[in-house]
Image (spheres, rainbow, N blue to C red):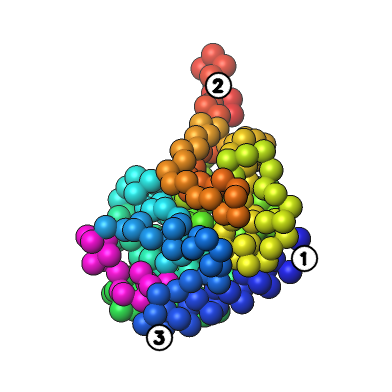
Amino acid sequence: MDGVKDVVQQKYGEAARQAMKGLKADCGCDTDGCCSGITSGLYDDAQASEVPGAALLASLGCGNPTALAELKAGEVVLDLGSGGGIDVLLSARRVGPTGMAYGLDMTDEMLALARENQREAGVTNVHFLQGEIEHIPLPDNSVDVIISNCVINLSADKDRVLAEAFRVLKPGGRFAVSDIVYRGSEVPEAIRRDMDLWAGCVAGALAEGTYREKLTRAGFEAVDLEPTRSHTIDGAEFASAFIRARKPAAAAKTCCASTCCA
């Protein structure tokens, strides 16, 4: 849909400026209080204490993908749409000094805020990248885990996002994101065309079955979708969900007598 990227960039740039002023960010969507209902209470006190206050203020997610992903020491993690950096910083602490956490965002203000939060947190195994989630600026097979927090729904080209996620994951790599899904067959047209509701993470949501189908079509296996919180927006039923999938492991070598063939 024309204009989605511009609206999202504008809304999230303003959200970053709010957080820089010490104010709780919002996505510019106040229909039925949808932002507060989706983004509140996602991090416990222990997690909140690990990041600067501005990172928490800038958080506009719908879940906690750092818990979902079960990160291990030494892994490389990529956060699609990293915003103020909260999930990147938490991930960096989980993977430790032998691992790396990348954050990818297209909004200048969010990247500036994230880098300031990184400096304040004193976390060194973090690298923030500027770019779009439809065009990930990392090599093939370079990431162990992809996380994202209520961002893939903001893209107007989700097939491209999922194809890119599949490309950069290593064989056996994990896709573990929090996102908004629609509980019916198709988001009502009136909601789909509302630019504020696009920025508010609901108008661009996929139906649960469609999300599963797109992941499978992109090449993923072990697809699982777990709704966690329900939301009613203009009479339509949505849910926050944990979405997991895996890139198949590389094919095992086949042995022909004494010679192993690739």
| Farthest residue, direction right | 2
The CA distance from mark 3 to mark 1 is 31 Å
Q: Classify mark 2: residues with Cα within 10 Å, few (<14), some (14-19) or many (20+).
A: few
Residue, disc 1: 2
- The residue drawn where x is 44% and y is 58% is 37
The CA distance from mark 2 to mark 3 is 60 Å
**Vertical placement of 244 versus 197: above or below?**
above
Towards the viewer: 30 or 92:
30
Name the quadrant of the N terminus.
bottom right
Q: What is the total number of numbered labels drawn onto the structure image? A: 3
First reached walking from the N terminus: tag 3 or tag 1: 1
Query: Does the stretch in magenta take in 69?
Result: no
| 196 lies left or right of 21 | right
| Farthest residue, direction top | 257
Asked if disc 1 and disc 2 are in contact, CB closer than 8 Å, the reply is no
Magenta extent:
45-58
Q: Amino acid at mark 3?
A: Lys
Name the secondary structure under disc 3: loop
**Vertical placement of 183 versus 42: above or below?**
above
Towards the viewer: 67 or 239:
239
The CA distance from mark 1 to mark 2 is 49 Å
